[in-house]
Image (cartoon, rainbow, N blue to C red):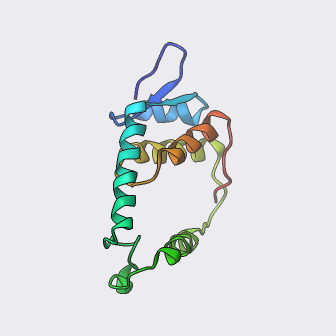
């Protein structure tokens, strides 16, 4: 991460600091490195090609756990991914502060920018836009 003179923080693949995450949590604007976004696009394209070629990809074109040998048809992949998200979408405890949620968003964004998840750059840009526009989801 780098910090230009205007106070914004540029996120990419380089290691960041706790101080930078704290500054983002406190509202510092962010920018995304083009190289990191380009890498995300390459990885995402590779994964899409593998899906198009019918390759087995755990949890994406196959089930998970005991269903690992179950191949998912293209029309079931989206529903399966959504159901996986829903099964993990629960929260307990007191609501987190805006600052805590922004820190989690920044760390998630930093992780996605490494290019290992296969998500498109559009997701990273959306999270950055939310942070820059002070849009913070409610999180228990």
| Residue 42 x, y percent position in the rendering | 36, 46
| Residue 26 x, y percent position in the rendering | 59, 32
Q: Is residue 94 above or below residue 114?
A: below
Nearer to the camera, 89 or 35: 35
Nearer to the camera, 4 or 129: 129
> Which quadrant, please, contains the N terminus?
top left
Q: How many callouts does the rendering have? A: 0
> Which quadrant, please, contains the C terminus?
bottom right
Q: Quadrant of residue 36?
A: top left
Q: Is residue 125 above or below residue 19?
A: below
| Residue 103 x, y percent position in the rendering | 53, 42
Q: Quadrant of residue 30?
A: top right
Residue occupying image coordinates x 38% and y 66%:
51
Residue occupying image coordinates x 33% and y 63%:
50
The answer to whether 66 appears left or right of 126 in the picture is left
Residue occupying image coordinates x 67% and y 35%:
133
| Residue 10 x, y percent position in the rendering | 46, 28
Nearer to the camera, 124 or 1: 124
Residue at the top extreme, as displayed: 5
Residue occupying image coordinates x 58% and y 68%:
89
Residue at the front extreme, as displayed: 53
């Amino acid at each position: 991460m780098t910090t230009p003179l205007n106070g914004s923080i540029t996120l990419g693949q380089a290691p960041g600091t706790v101080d930078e995450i704290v500054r983002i949590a406190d509202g510092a604007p962010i920018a995304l490195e083009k190289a990191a976004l380009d890498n995300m696009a390459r990885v995402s394209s590779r994964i899409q090609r593998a899906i198009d070629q019918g390759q087995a990809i755990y949890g994406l074109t196959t089930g998970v756990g005991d269903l690992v040998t179950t191949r998912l048809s293209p029309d079931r992949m989206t529903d399966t991914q959504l159901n996986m998200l829903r099964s993990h979408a629960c929260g307990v405890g007191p609501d987190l502060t805006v600052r805590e949620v922004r820190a989690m968003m920044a760390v998630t964004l930093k992780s996605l920018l490494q290019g290992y998840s296969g998500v498109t750059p559009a997701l990273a840009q959306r999270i950055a836009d939310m942070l820059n526009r002070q849009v913070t989801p409610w999180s228990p």
